[in-house]
Image (cartoon, rainbow, N blue to C red):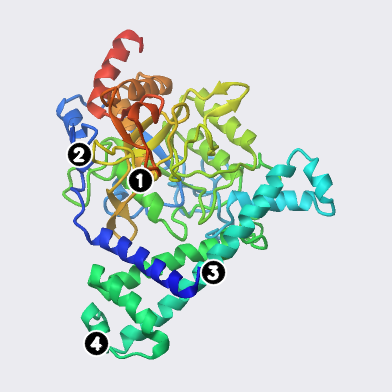
Amino acid sequence: MKLYNKILWIGASLATISAVSAQSKPDKHWYHSKPSKKNMGISLTEAYGMGIPSKKTIVVAVIDGGTDINHPDLKSVIWHNPGEIPFNNIDDDNNGYVDDTVGWNFIGGADGKMVGKDNLEATRVYKKLKDKFNGMTEEQIAAQPEGALYEKLKSDIGMKSAMYKSIFDTYKDLDKNWTDIAMKTGKINPSAADIEAMPVSAEQEKYKASLVKAMKKTGSFLSLKKELKSGLEQLDGMANYQYNLDFDPRASIVGDNYSNSRERFYGNNNVSGPDASHGTHVAGIIGAVRGNNVGLDGVADNVRIMVVRVVPDGDERDKDVANGIRYAVENGAQVINMSFGKGYSWDKGVVNEAIKFAESKGVLLVHAAGNSSLNIDQELNYPNDSLGGGEFAKNWIEVGASQPKAKILATDFSNYGKNNVDLFSPGQDIYSTIPNNDYAYFNGTSMAAPVCAGVAAFVWSRYPELTAEQIKYVLETSTNKMKPSAKVKVPGSKESALFTDLSKTGGLLNASRALVQAENCKVTGCK
C-alpha cells in the first residue's frame, strides 16, 4: 500500500473511531434491564426486585493487567487479606507473599519494577523452536513433529512484524504532519474550517486533506489527536515489542526461573501495574459500589474484589496464569474472572493443574472467549477448559459477547462456538471504572465475562449452599433463548446463523431466571 493510501486509510479509520466515540452512548446500565428487541439486557434490575436477601460476601478474583484499588467506586469493595499487616515488609500469614494486602502481582520484581510491554505467546513459541531447530536443514525441520508449526509461526511473525512497523511509522508521520499543520493555525483546538483555510506546502497538501476529512466527522482536533495517540501506543507495542524476537523483559525484572513452570513465589505487591485501565474496568463491572449515585452500579452487591496481576501489554504467560489461579484459590476467592486469552500455549499442563486445583476447592472460573471473530471449535484459544484425555473442567464458563439489538445480538468481534463457548453476555458499550477516578465505555468479551462473573457472585451470595458446579449449571440452564428459528449475524462475517448455534446453551445470560433456577437447585439438587 502506498504511503498516501495508507494515510487516507488510517485517517478514515481514526475518523470512524472518533465519530463512534462522539455518538451518544446507551444508558450506562442498559444491560441491567429486561431483554427487548432493541435492548437485550439480563434482567438484573428485575432480579434485585425479587427481594431475595444476600447471605454471604463472595470474593471475586480479577486476574488481569492491574486494578486501581483507590478508585472511589471500588475502594470499599476491594478485598483485604485478613492475615497480612500492611507495609511491614513481613509475610505475616506465611503464604509466601510479603505484604499481599489486596492481592499479588506475578509480573513484577522484588525491587518493585514491573513488566509492561511483552511478547505475544506466538513470538515466544517461535523463538523457542527457532533455537531448537538452529542448524537444521529445511528437510530436517519438516521431519520434526513441530516443524509445520515452526514454519507457520516464522511466516506469520515475519509478515506481521513488518506490517505493524510500517503502519507504526506511517502513524508517526501522520502525527507529526497533522500536529504541524494544526499549530500553524495558532489555536490549541482548531476546527476543520480553520485547517481548511490554512495554507500549507505542496508536500503537506495530502496530510491537510486527510486531516480535514477526519475532522469534518469529529469536529475537534484534540479528540482526533487523542485517538491518534491511542493508536500510536497500541502500534508501538505491536511494532516494537510483541513480535520482537530480541525483546525479553522478564529476566531482568521478575528474576524467576522461567523454565520452572511450578515455581510459585516471585513478583511483588503492586497490583496496579503500569496501566490499570483494563483490570479497573473489569472490576467495576463486577462490583462497583451500588446505590452511591456515583459512576455506575456494579452487577454484584455483596462482593469483594481480589486483585491478581498476570497480564502485560502482550500475552500473559502460562506460569503466571497458573500461579494467579492458585493464589486466588488459596486466599479465599470463590469466583475468578479471566478476561484474557491467546492463540498459543507455552505450558498448558501447568494451567490445567491449576484449573483442577480450583475445581477441587469449589471455585468457579469465568473466562472471556476472545475478540477475533473466530469459531473456537475450530481455532484454539487459551486458556480453556480442555484438560486432556477427553476431560473438561466442570467449574469453567466460557463467555461470548452480545450487544443490545436482538436482530444482531452477537457482537461483530466475539469469538463463538457451539461446543466451546457456553453462553453470551453483554459486552458492547459497557460503562465502568477506569483509573484516575474516571469512567469509560469499553467493548469486548473482556467486559462480557465480568458481567457473567458478577451474576455468579450475585446468585451465589443468595444461595451460598450451592457448589461451583451448581452455579455453573444455574447460569447455563437459565439463559434467555431466542426463537429456534431466529438468525443473527455471524461475528466477523456477512453470513447469518441461528443464535442457538453460536454457543453450547444457545442463550443469553439472565439474572432473574438464574435466581429462579438457583431456588430450584436448592430444592431439587439441580435435577
Question: Is 74 drawn above or below residue 209 in the view shown?
Answer: above
Q: Which residue is mark 3?
A: 166
Q: Secondary structure at mark 3?
A: helix
Lower sequence index among marks 4 and 1:
4
* Quadrant in the picture for the C terminus: top left
Distance between the alpha carbons at the discs numbered 2 and 1: 23 Å
Residue type at numbered disc 2 = Asn
Distance between the alpha carbons at the discs numbered 1 and 3: 36 Å
Residue found at x 45% / y 68%: 232
Q: Which residue is mark 1?
A: 283
Q: Which residue is mark 4?
A: 197
Question: Is 515 drawn above or below residue 91 in the view shown?
Answer: above
Residue type at numbered disc 1 = Ala
Residue type at numbered disc 3 = Ser
Question: Is 94 drawn above or below residue 504 in the view shown?
Answer: below
Lower sequence index among marks 1 and 3:
3
Residue found at x 58% / y 27%: 387
Where's residue 171, x and y in %? 45, 72
Distance between the alpha carbons at the discs numbered 3 and 4: 31 Å
Q: Which residue is mark 2?
A: 39
Where's residue 281, x and y in %? 34, 50
